[in-house]
Image (cartoon, rainbow, N blue to C red):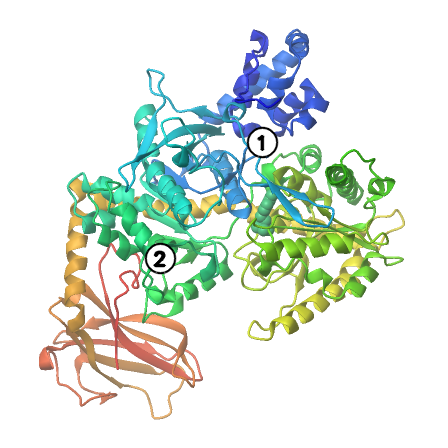
């Protein structure tokens, strides 16, 4: 019989154990091992069965067991001590509280997905896990973040594999009452709602859930409530479910509804209102429009409100390809913003924000809007910063790529979440710290034997888990059948174990390892140096190509001669990952460079002493040092795709055969791979602090949040005086700009054959179109020149307006272009002068340009205005 309605009844705990509720109610348990140990102690078997979920555990445990524990004085004392520890964690000043100088009172962090714990499946992959790790580190560091997202009834899909290797998807519904969430309520107990006006005169209502992630509150909006029409209840049905309008509704809810939820929640609780807004990828970009609308309510016009909203907004882009960007049909966006959604905001102003500089006229581009609404933008690794500056260069025509105002902050991962408890215990007992990311792993206080024993135990633990998963999968494929014996022998806990797990878009090249099946077979079954490979990953439900790749792997692994050495594990998720990363010796990553924006799974593997074997893409070029793993050489990106795959696959096989495997099996008399253990120490000590999310969050605070907070404060002071001035100034500059030009440039001072150290004197005659010299910077841009006249390694130096007494103003120079002009103001042009020292030999080139200047501009390129000589 099927239930027509389901709900979860929460357990009533004996009063002596009341603190367990408090501990279960804060997701700190998901990364705090001592708290997890307390839950495990209640009933270890059940704790495993419920997937390490305290709320589910407390709902399922027999009351008799709880009564028994309530009379166990030691356990009760342990629980109470842990509650006190949690309270202290929540209240005591941390890193952020110790920072000197201005800092934001609060930062709202928006993301379409959050991967915090297996028990709260609201993520599809790296983007969500990163967001979860960002919140956790912010909590540990005391950064006053407020998380904002959506609550999806079905989360992302759950993956099974059919007997023929085809991916099957299911969408188990979540019951929020059974999750560590509670509804945000007003003092009278009623739910605090959020509403959005829709074009057809209807209203989209949402309920706000909140989760406690350590010190951070995460607000999640949910439309599955009776106030909504049936179709609108489905808006938050699943993550990245539909396209077009469904997706637009989700993003309107996330951005606009999310900003409203933050406002209501801060008003309700007295938490400071955010002065900085951070959008993790472009999906939440509409939040900027809600902020503009709300500022317009305070009497600003659109242009003025835009300055304030921009100043306080941080936009992080995660995609290296145009195809990865959200784009909507322009007419669809027009329809939604022609309604009462944001009545103060003119729809044409909205559409202009999402207009592509070089693309189709009928699309609305969320990343482009993100960059226009976010004065502070970044990619997620150094390489991805470069790729992003290239990708979005059309928005800033006339500027060198290095000047495009997109910075980079390399992703990181939350060490306490991703470090196995066995390694944590080793750090605690031998190195006297629970901070595994900053422990002295090179120290001889941890012996090679001990470190290797832990690594071996981790491999065992993972192999056991993999076998259980494969048996489950077999049972699903063969209902009623008996699991065959060979599944109990899949993987050998002593064999070199290589892991590969990630989503399956084609650029990640899941099947590169199959390029030469015979060569792979030989590596797997090598008589002295065998390897084994574990693979996992979900293909997007609409991506049949990805599903075919999974099928190829599964079919290859079906071979009875190979199936104990290679296996695909269905349903990659946080729980699997937490055992897989520590259990592998080598983490493999072979994307098509440069399509991996950062990649974080290799970081999580590194935290546990696995070595990375990766293409130099994403984070790896920044951190690979020759001893912490291996770099797979990449072929030229311009070449033939098949040829490139062949080259890179062979490089991979060669590395495994000649370097990785021999090193792993090179053992001392006592069976320790001494060289390998050295590399593990080197990797743990060198990489862990760098790949930790604490480093990332500190970078965001210093490079993004504080500058954004300061910019926002400057513009808002005195009833937005500076915002009004800046908007008026920008308007005047835009109007005047067609009249701005470099009339001509004269140079002198260098010999006929210039030498390093020579000084080049420049005089530029510039038309200002009615602007004052203070409104502009006239700059010489110089660097290495190439045959096509392009400049590289570009430097910029500002020229100064000539005064009558300026020695450079003397006409000692020859005209580069046009006849020489005399003094100041021929044809109304102004003279700017300066000197550049020739600092390198070889091709040298320069040009002169004019850009707007204002103390509140973040970069020269910000307004996208430039007038270049010639
Ligand atoms: C870390 C992680 C990812 C992302 O890994 P990438 O290397 O960035 O692709 C995806 N899924 C899970 C479960 C993870 O833990």
Q: Which residue is mark 2?
A: 368
Image disc number at residue 119: 1
The percent position of residue 609, horizontal first and vertical second, equals 69, 47
User: Where, by quadrant of the figure, is residue 583 drawn?
Assistant: top right
Image spot of residue 376 (x, y percent): 35, 52
Residue 356 vs residue 157, the one in the foreground: 157
Q: Residue at x 53, y 21 (%)?
A: 7
Write down the quadrant of residue 145 in the picture: top left
Q: Residue furthest bottom?
A: 752
Quadrant location of the C terminus in the rendered image? bottom left
As drawn, the label of residue 490 is: none
Q: Is residue 132 left or right of residue 856?
A: right
For the point 65% across and 16% down, the residue is 61
Q: Position of residue 791 (x, y in %)?
A: 39, 78
Q: Residue at x 40, y 66 (%)?
A: 402
Cβ of disc 2 within 8 Å of ligand 1? no
At which x and y percent is residue 819? 18, 90
């Amino acid at each position: 019989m099927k239930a027509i309605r389901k709900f979860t009844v929460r357990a009533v705990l004996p009063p002596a154990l009341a603190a367990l509720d408090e501990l279960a109610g804060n997701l700190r348990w998901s990364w705090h091992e001592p708290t997890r140990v307390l839950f495990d102690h209640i009933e270890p078997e059940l704790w495993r069965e419920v997937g390490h979920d305290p709320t589910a555990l407390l709902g399922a445990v027999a009351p008799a067991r709880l009564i028994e524990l309530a009379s166990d004085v030691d356990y009760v004392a342990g629980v109470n001590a842990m509650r006190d520890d949690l309270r202290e964690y929540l209240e005591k000043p941390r890193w952020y509280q110790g920072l000197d100088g201005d800092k934001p009172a609060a930062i709202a962090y928006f993301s379409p997905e959050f991967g915090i714990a297996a028990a709260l499946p609201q993520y599809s992959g790296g983007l969500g896990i990163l967001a979860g790790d960002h919140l956790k580190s912010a909590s540990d560091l005391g950064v006053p973040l407020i998380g904002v997202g959506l609550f999806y009834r079905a989360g992302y899909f759950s993956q099974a594999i059919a007997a023929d290797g085809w991916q099957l998807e299911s969408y188990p519904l979540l019951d929020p009452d059974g999750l560590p969430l509670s509804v945000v309520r007003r003092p009278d107990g009623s739910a605090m709602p959020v509403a959005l006006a829709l074009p057809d005169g209807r209203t989209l209502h949402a309920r706000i859930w909140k989760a406690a992630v350590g010190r951070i509150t995460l607000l999640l909006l949910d439309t599955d409530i009776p106030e909504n029409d049936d179709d609108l209840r489905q808006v938050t049905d699943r993550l990245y479910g539909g396209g077009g309008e469904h997706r637009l509704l989700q993003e309107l809810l996330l951005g606009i509804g999310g900003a409203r939820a933050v406002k209501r929640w801060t008003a309700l609780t007295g938490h400071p209102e955010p002065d900085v807004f951070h959008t993790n990828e472009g999906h939440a970009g509409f939040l900027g429009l809600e902020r503009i609308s709300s500022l317009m309510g305070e009497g600003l016009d659109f242009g003025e409100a835009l300055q304030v909203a921009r100043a306080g907004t941080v936009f992080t882009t995660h995609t290296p390809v145009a195809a990865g960007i959200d784009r909507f049909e322009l007419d669809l966006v027009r329809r939604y913003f022609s309604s009462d959604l944001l009545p103060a905001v003119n729809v044409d102003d909205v559409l202009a924000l999402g207009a592509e500089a070089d693309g189709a006229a009928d699309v609305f581009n969320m990343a482009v809007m993100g960059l226009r609404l976010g004065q502070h933008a970044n990619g997620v690794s150094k390489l991805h910063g470069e790729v992003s500056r290239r990708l979005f260069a059309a928005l800033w025509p006339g500027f060198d790529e290095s000047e495009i105002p997109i910075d980079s902050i390399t992703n990181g991962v939350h060490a306490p979440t991703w470090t196995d408890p066995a390694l944590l215990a080793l750090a605690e007992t031998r190195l006297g710290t629970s901070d595994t990311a900053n422990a002295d792993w090179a120290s001889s206080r941890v012996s090679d034997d001990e470190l290797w024993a832990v690594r071996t135990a981790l491999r065992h633990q993972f192999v056991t888990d993999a076998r259980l998963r494969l048996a489950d999968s077999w049972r699903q494929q063969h209902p009623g059948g008996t699991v065959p014996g060979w599944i109990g022998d899949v993987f050998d806990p002593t064999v070199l174990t290589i892991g590969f797990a990630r989503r399956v878009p084609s650029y990640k090249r899941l099947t590169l390892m199959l390029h030469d099946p015979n060569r792979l077979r030989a590596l797997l079954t090598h008589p002295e140096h065998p390897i084994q490979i574990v693979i996992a990953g979900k293909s997007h439900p609409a991506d049949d190509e990805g599903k075919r790749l999974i099928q190829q792997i599964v079919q290859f692994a079906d071979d009875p001669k190979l199936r104990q050495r290679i296996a695909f594990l269905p349903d990659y998720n946080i729980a699997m990952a937490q055992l897989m990363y520590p259990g592998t010796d080598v983490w493999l990553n072979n994307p098509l460079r440069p399509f991996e924006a950062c990649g974080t799974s290799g970081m999580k593997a590194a935290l546990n002493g696995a070595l990375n074997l990766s293409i130099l893409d994403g984070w790896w070029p920044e951190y690979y040092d020759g001893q912490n793993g291996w770099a797979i050489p990449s072929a030229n990106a311009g070449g033939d795709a098949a040829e490139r795959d062949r080259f890179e696959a062979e490089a991979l096989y060669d590395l495994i055969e000649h370097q990785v495997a021999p090193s792993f099996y090179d053992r001392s008399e006592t069976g320790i791979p001494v060289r390998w253990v050295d590399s593990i120490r080197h990797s743990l000590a060198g990489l862990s602090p760098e790949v930790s999310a604490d480093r990332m969050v500190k970078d965001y605070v210093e490079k993004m949040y504080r500058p954004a907070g300061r910019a926002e404060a400057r513009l808002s002071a005195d009833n937005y005086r500076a915002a009004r001035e800046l908007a008026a100034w920008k308007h005047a500059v835009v109007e005047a700009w067609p009249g701005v030009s470099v009339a001509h440039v004269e140079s002198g001072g260098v010999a006929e054959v210039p030498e390093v150290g020579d000084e080049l004197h420049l005089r530029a005659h510039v038309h200002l179109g009615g602007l004052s010299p203070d409104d502009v910077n006239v700059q010489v841009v110089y660097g290495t020149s190439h045959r096509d006249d392009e400049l590289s390694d570009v430097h910029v130096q500002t020229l100064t307006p000539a005064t009558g007494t300026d020695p450079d103003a003397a006409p000692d120079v020859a005209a580069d272009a046009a006849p020489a002009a005399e003094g100041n103001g021929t044809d109304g042009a102004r003279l700017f002068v300066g000197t550049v020292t020739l600092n390198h030999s070889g091709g040298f080139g320069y040009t002169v340009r004019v850009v707007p200047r204002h103390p509140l501009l973040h970069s020269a390129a910000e307004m996208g205005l430039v007038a270049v000589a010639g």
